[in-house]
Amino acid sequence: MRRGFGRPLRRAFAPDVPPLLRRANQMLSAGNHAEASSAYEQLARAAEARGGPRAPFFYIQAGRARMLSGHAADGVELLERGLGLFAMRGQQLKAANVGPRLVLELSARGYTAEAQQVSDYLDELIPGFAAPSTEKKASRRPALPAHCPACGAPLRPDEVEWVDDSAAVCEYCGSPVYGEG
């Protein structure tokens, strides 16, 4: 197996997953969006306070859950906080990968004004940002499971960090996740 130069697999085993993260993912899966949003936001604030690398993802997941609970303005605020943290940390590529998916998700749910707001915010963060197209990019990597086996978070192949051609790292708990097939 080949790994990218200087990018060894961070952990050979699943780290201790915070119980609050597992609970947040379970609540989201069960449709309890308001409580899931609160849990993700609590995780995000704690991670941000300690400079944790997962804080932006927790804010984005909190925003998604808040939107699903019917609180669009609060949801957009959390989404923008997560995207802004990426930019503030010099991770514009992460924002450029995650942002278009958020815009498409908002549009698909009928939140066109909010989708435009996030798109405009992305354009401020990343000059030259273009609204996403609906075309899918072809991928040669194996399919990932829909959810992380360790924490239950949703896995999106274009948002995870791939450490080699068959393994990625869960953006929420840091566990290695191996492709299927």
Image (tube, grey):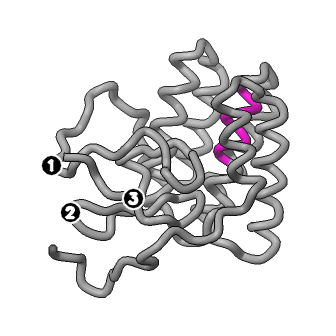
Q: CA distance from mark 2 to mark 3?
A: 12 Å
Taking the image as shown, residue 44 lies to the left or right of residue 115, namely right
For the residues carrying marks 2 and 3, which lies nearer the camera in this image? Answer: 3
Q: Is residue 109 left or right of residue 66?
A: left
Looking at the image, residue 92 lies above or below residue 153: below
Q: Earlier in the sequence, mark 2 or mark 3?
A: 2
Q: Position of residue 139 (x, y in %)?
A: 19, 45
Mark 3 lies on a secondary structure that is strand
- Name the front one of labels 3 and 1: 3
Left or right? Give the position of 171 relative to 33: left
Find the distance from the CA under tag 1 to the CA under tag 2: 8 Å
Of helix, strand and loop, which one carries label 2?
loop
How far apart are the two marked residues, 3 and 1, measured between alpha carbons?
Answer: 16 Å
The answer to whether the residues at label 3 and label 1 have Cβ atoms under 8 Å apart is no
Which residue is at a point 23% across and 76% down the rendered structure image? Answer: 3
Question: Of the numbered discs in the image, which one, if any, rests on residue 140?
Answer: 1
Q: Amino acid at mark 3?
A: Val
* Residue sitting at the far bottom: 6
Please, what secondary structure does the residue beneath circle 1 have?
loop
Q: Which mark is residue 165?
A: 2
User: Residue 116, percent across and down?
Assistant: 59, 27
Of pointers 1 and 2, the one earlier in the residue sequence: 1
Quarter of the rendering occupied by the N terminus? bottom left
Q: In the rendered image, which quarter is residue 102 located in?
A: top right
Q: Which residues make up the magenta segment?
A: 60-67
Magenta stretch holds residue 150: no
- Identified at 49% across, 61% down, the residue is 92
From the top left corner, tell me how far across and down residue 155 is, in percent: 46, 45
Q: Nearer the viewer, residue 3 or 131?
A: 3
Question: What residue sits right under mark 3 in the picture?
Answer: 177
Q: Amino acid at mark 1?
A: Arg
